[in-house]
């Protein structure tokens, strides 16, 4: 069967089922379903009549699924409690300020390069590559475009590095002085940049994170168990004093589950020094220091059943203590959602379904979709994953939808990832519906426009059919 035969078959089926071809998103979703059948036909070389029968078998289920998804999205769009978020680095915020000193790209490049050279001398950044690819060669125009998009769409920002302990704790200084925590070890310079940016632009800050297995600081190596807990208590108290007004939620625990089925907890120095129940005690300290802020356990790999089993076992252990002591230690689960074009719909839906059964709040915290590294104006598989996550989010009452990285260029997987903005720093084809559904700023803007303006936008016909 060639493409023309396929187009003729599809047209006949569309006509027979009275499918609305003016809904572009509907057609994309339908096309993906049919392309699966088409790929199957090519592999198996099945007869045309069998192929037509298979498509007709798929479509009614598709129509039901799509209607449910559209209804859920429409309901969430009416809510004023949702938030759209992105992760952001302090360097980009500094670059926003640098643009204000410039009139053109030439001036900007000079100041940009001087800025990164100075940063290279900071001792906190000597042992890891802290600058996301794409930042060092960003242009004046790109920086301004990113800034404007963020101001238009974003309700909540998450620090990519500067909320991590390695960027705050000065390991060159002693931990203890006169039996007290040495307050000189704390340096909040970079986290302050994000907090102040959020305050200036009516955003909230999602704190990422308190405990991470890679961030057991060297100055804790020779400390006793009691001293480490005293340090953590002091650290959280300092964070609370500085940022409680702007914190939206906090990743108290980050990536503590084992990746293998032979153990539940990941091996880490936190566990070695503090014991198997360390995460319970840390949550108790967090509840003491952040009594009015939602506390989260943030984790990746949820789409893999063996990893998810470990994560849920940790949640159950926390809930057991909560029930025994009559307290709430953990408010929610952060679902990182680092997927690829190979991630199946079924694995995503199973993960979100299993998490919802815990009764904890859910946040999408780090969504991005890895691709094959080639530039695509539109990729069906990428769109499929984004839409499936949006479907899960609206089905299970997710209130925060956060993507990881600013654009396809400025990300931990630069050039091989799709997230908020595309390579031209426009809102990507894949994230536009997420922004429209979750961004509180967008909702208020549209509400104000409808109250004060007349919509004279012209209706346009969308082209339907399979694009091979």
Image (tube, helix red, strand yellow):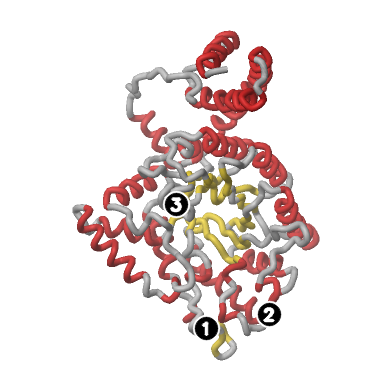
Q: Is residue 51 above or below residue 327?
A: above
User: Is residue 188 among the parts visible in the rendering?
Assistant: yes
Residue 130, numbered label = none
* Tag in front: 1 or 2: 2
Q: Which mark is residue 182?
A: 1
Q: State the image quarter where residue 273 is shown.
A: bottom right
Which residue is under mark 3?
414
Looking at the image, residue 376 sits to the left or right of residue 301; the answer is left
Quick one: SS at disc 3?
loop
Q: Nearer the viewer, residue 73 or 108?
A: 108
- Binning the other alpha carbons within 10 Å of mark 1 as few (below 14), some (14 to 19) or many (20 upward) gives some
Gap in Å between the C-alphas at discs 1 and 2?
A: 17 Å
User: Residue drawn 57% across and 44% down?
Assistant: 340
Point out the image quarter for the N terminus. top right
Reading the chain from its start, which is encountered first: label 3 or label 2? Answer: 2
Secondary structure type for disc 2 = helix
User: In the picture shown, does residue 274 fall above or below 80?
Assistant: below
Q: Which residue is mark 2?
A: 225
Residue 347 image offset from top left, x and y in percent:
67, 41
Q: Nearer the viewer, residue 257 or 200?
A: 257
Contact between marks 1 and 2 (CB within 8 A): the answer is no
Residue at point 38% right, 34% down?
448
Q: CA distance from mark 3 to mark 1?
A: 39 Å
């Amino acid at each position: 069967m060639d493409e023309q035969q396929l187009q003729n078959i599809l047209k006949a089926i569309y006509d027979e089922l009275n499918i609305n071809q003016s809904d572009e998103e509907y057609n994309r979703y339908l096309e993906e379903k049919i392309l699966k059948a088409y790929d199957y036909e090519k592999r198996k070389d099945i007869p045309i009549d069998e192929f037509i029968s298979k498509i007709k078998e798929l479509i009614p289920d598709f129509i039901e699924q799509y209607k449910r998804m559209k209804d859920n999205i429409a309901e969430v769009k009416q809510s004023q409690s949702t938030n759209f978020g992105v992760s952001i680095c302090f360097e980009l915020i500094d670059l926003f300020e640098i643009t204000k000193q410039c009139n053109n790209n030439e001036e900007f490049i000079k100041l940009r390069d001087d800025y990164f050279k100075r940063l290279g001398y900071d001792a906190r950044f000597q042992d890891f590559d802290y600058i996301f690819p794409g930042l060092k060669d960003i242009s004046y125009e790109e920086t301004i475009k990113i800034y404007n998009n963020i101001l238009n769409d974003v309700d909540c920002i998450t620090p990519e590095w500067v909320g991590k302990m390695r960027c705050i704790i000065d390991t060159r200084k002693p931990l203890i002085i006169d039996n007290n925590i040495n307050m000189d070890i704390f340096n909040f310079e970079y986290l302050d940049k994000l907090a102040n940016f959020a305050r200036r632009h009516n955003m909230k800050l999602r704190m990422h994170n308190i405990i991470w297995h890679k961030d057991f600081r060297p100055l804790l190596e020779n400390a006793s168990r009691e001293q480490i807990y005293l340090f953590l208590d002091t650290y959280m108290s300092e964070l609370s004093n500085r940022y409680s007004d702007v914190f939206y939620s906090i990743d108290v625990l980050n990536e503590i589950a084992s990746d293998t089925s032979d153990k539940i907890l990941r091996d880490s120095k936190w566990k070695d020094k503090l014991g198997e129940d360390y995460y319970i005690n840390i949550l108790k300290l967090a509840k003491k220091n952040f009594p009015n802020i939602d506390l989260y356990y943030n984790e990746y790999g949820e789409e893999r059943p063996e990893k998810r089993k470990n994560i849920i076992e940790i949640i159950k252990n926390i809930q057991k203590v909560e029930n025994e002591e009559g307290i709430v230690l953990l408010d929610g689960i952060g679902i990182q959602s680092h997927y690829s074009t190979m991630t199946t719909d079924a694995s995503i839906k199973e993960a979100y379904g299993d998490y919802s059964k815990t009764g904890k709040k859910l946040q999408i915290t780090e969504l991005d979709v890895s691709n094959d590294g080639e530039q695509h104006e539109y990729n069906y598989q990428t769109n499929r994953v984004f839409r499936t996550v949006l479907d899960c989010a609206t089905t299970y009452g997710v209130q925060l939808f956060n993507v990881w990285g600013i654009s396809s260029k400025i990300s931990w997987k630069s050039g091989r990832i799709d997230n908020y903005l595309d390579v031209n720093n426009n809102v990507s084809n894949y994230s536009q519906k997420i922004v429209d559904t979750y961004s509180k700023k967008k909702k208020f803007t549209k509400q104000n426009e409808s109250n004060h303006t007349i919509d004279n936008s012209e209706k346009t016909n969308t082209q339907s059919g399979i694009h091979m």
